[in-house]
Structures are given as C-alpha cells and as structure tokens.
Image (tube, grey):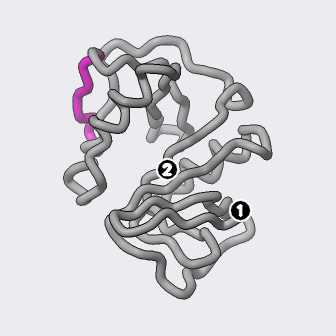
Amino acid sequence: MESQRELLTEYILKQLARHNQLFVPVSNFMDDTMQHVPFEPSDILVLNSYHIPEPIHKKPPINPIELDVIFIPLLQADVQGNRLGYGKGFYDRYLALCRPDVIKIGLNFFEPIPAIPTEETDIPLDYLITPNRIYEFK
C-alpha cells in the first residue's frame, strides 16, 4: 500500500510473472478473511475502501495449501522474524491455512529491530528483504 509507505512491488511482480503464477490478496473486512486470486501484471488494480489495491475482475481464489511463497506486507520486523502488521490478523489467519513449509517473505524499507511483542497466533517470517540485506530466520 503506497499510502502506508510500503515498498512498491510492481517491478517484483513483473519479474516473478515471467516464470511463476502469481496471486494477490483480496480482503473481506466484513468477516476479516482473506483470499488470494490469480494475477497477471496486465490486470487492473483499484483501491478498495481501505486503500488496498485489488483486481477489478476477481478470479476464483487459490486453495492456500497450494501456495509455495507468500510476500507479506508489514510495518516492522524483529531479528527473530516476528512482524508487526496493521493489527487485524489477516495474514496470521491466512498463513494458518497454508502448508507449514510455505515460504514467508517480508519486504520492508527498515532493518529489523531487537524485539516485537508477539501473540500465540502470530506466524513469523522466514525471510526479510530490506534495501541493505536479506535476513533469514529459519
């Protein structure tokens, strides 16, 4: 989300789409659930009422257990791979539906801090990519 000063991922998506099937999240704020729908770089995205870009034409979602890698937006991460999001728990609930070996990658402008408070339902990152370094937490 550009409004939250998150990394712009358009270039990453275009590069990944050359050899991978991509999916983007679609959030349901009525029941606090999220799905991932197929995405092509030519698809048109519009901002929903929460300023999150989503495809205009939503395709049937993928089963979460079929995903191999998930890029996760975040505000901050710590040196253990814990992440601070926007407080609604969308990604933790969605990640709980994925295979245990799904690769979870955070993208952030900032280096990790020493510690972030966690809850039992929090699912940490496997990797964090910042402008200066790639961190591995496994």
Q: Position of residue 94 (x, y in %)?
A: 63, 42
Characterize the local packing of mark 2: few (<14), some (14-19) or many (20 or more) Cα atoms within 10 angstroms.
some
Q: Quadrant of residue 130?
A: bottom left
Which residue sits at x=59%, y=81%? 117
Which residue sits at x=61%, y=21%? 62
Label 1 sits on residue: 121
Judging from the image, what secondary structure is the residue with disc 2 in? Answer: strand
Q: Is residue 17 magenta?
A: no
Task: Specify the amino acid type for callout 1.
Answer: Thr
Query: On the picture, is 69 further left or further right than 15?
Result: right
Judging from the image, what secondary structure is the residue with disc 1 in? Answer: loop
Q: Position of residue 86 (x, y in %)?
A: 43, 61
- Quarter of the image for the C terminus: give it: bottom right
Label 2 sits on residue: 72
Q: Residue furthest right?
A: 100
Query: Upstream in the sequence, badge 2 or badge 1?
Result: 2
Query: On the picture, is 92 further left or further right than 25?
Result: right
77 vs 129, nearest the viewer: 129
Q: Position of residue 109 (x, y in %)?
A: 32, 65
Residue stretch rendered in magenta on the structure: 43-50
